[in-house]
Amino acid sequence: MTQTSAPQLPRWIYLPAAFAAAFVVLPLVAVALKVDWPRFWSLISSDSSTAALLLSLRTAAVSTLLCVLLGVPLALVLARSEGRFVRFTRPLILLPLVLPPVVGGIALLYAFGRLGLIGRYLEAAGVQIAFTTTAVVLAQTFVSLPFLVIALEGAARTAGADFEVVAATLGARPSTVWWRVTLPLLGPGLLSGAVLAFARALGEFGATLTFAGSREGVTRTLPLEIYLQREADPDAAVALSLLLVVVAAVVVIGLGSRRLRVGGANVT
């Protein structure tokens, strides 16, 4: 199928676009230039730095899995339901997008802390969440879930329900429609949302510090390690900052490559 070319943009629009790109790229270049490259490996390979990186990767992966398990059904309900309760609930679900992370951490503390709304009952049952690795995962999930939901909800609205209606008309059961029609249609949106959620979880700082604290090997993720190293060893903080940027860039570039491959396969 022949694709029509997009209309040309006005030339003046490239100037603010260039300023926007420079505004994002220049600070990252400044970090790279500030790194003590002869000592780079030793700065990022200390025991505390390695533990923080591995903890960040593990907790971000688990929180992303939770976001997928909880966010996919939630996004579908938001996209397909027109009920008044759903319309009222949607802004509350997306509220962590604009909340200061510290506020999110305080909210989690008063919900799941030792004397919190739910935490007091968990404490009575011998389950402690605050200031544990579980608290890190919950903090990351709290701030990341809306990113996946909003990406997947948009994909669901764009895809529509026509194919699902046809499948149901042909006699497919709701579960069959879900697995064979709905999820494949939402694949690209789910991939984008999961990557956004993982990247957001990887960089989470405020909610984690407030709700989980900073215990080495237990709750001290890479952003917390960078914050601590900023006072003790600025060179290590800069090196770890660049490491975090590289990890995030690998995730984003991986998503872009996948999209290019998928898009290229669909062009005929």
Image (cartoon, rainbow, N blue to C red):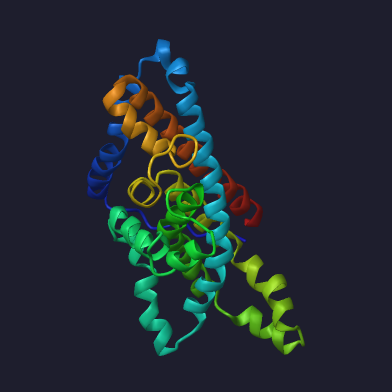
Query: With respect to residue 223, does 174 lie above or below?
Result: below
Query: With respect to residue 116, does 222 lie above or below?
Result: above
Image location (x, y in percent) of residue 107: 33, 62
Q: Which residue is drawn at 44% across and 64% down?
A: 119
How many marks the image carries: the answer is 0
Residue sitting farthest toward the right: 171
Can residue 133 be seen? yes
Q: Which of 187 and 248 is in front in this view?
A: 248
Query: With respect to residue 119, does 224 lie above or below?
Result: above
Image location (x, y in percent) of residue 183: 64, 68
Image quadrant holding the N terminus, namely: bottom right
Image quadrant holding the C terminus, namely: bottom right
Can residue 253 be seen? no
Say left or right for 258 vs 204. Answer: right
Image location (x, y in percent) of residue 159: 55, 72
Image location (x, y in percent) of residue 238: 34, 25
Q: Nearer the viewer, residue 44 or 146?
A: 44
Q: Quadrant of residue 25?
A: top left
Q: Residue at x 26, y 48 (%)?
A: 11
Say left or right for 25 vs 178. Answer: left
Q: Residue at x 45, y 44 (%)?
A: 202
Query: With respect to residue 239, does 268 lie above or below?
Result: below
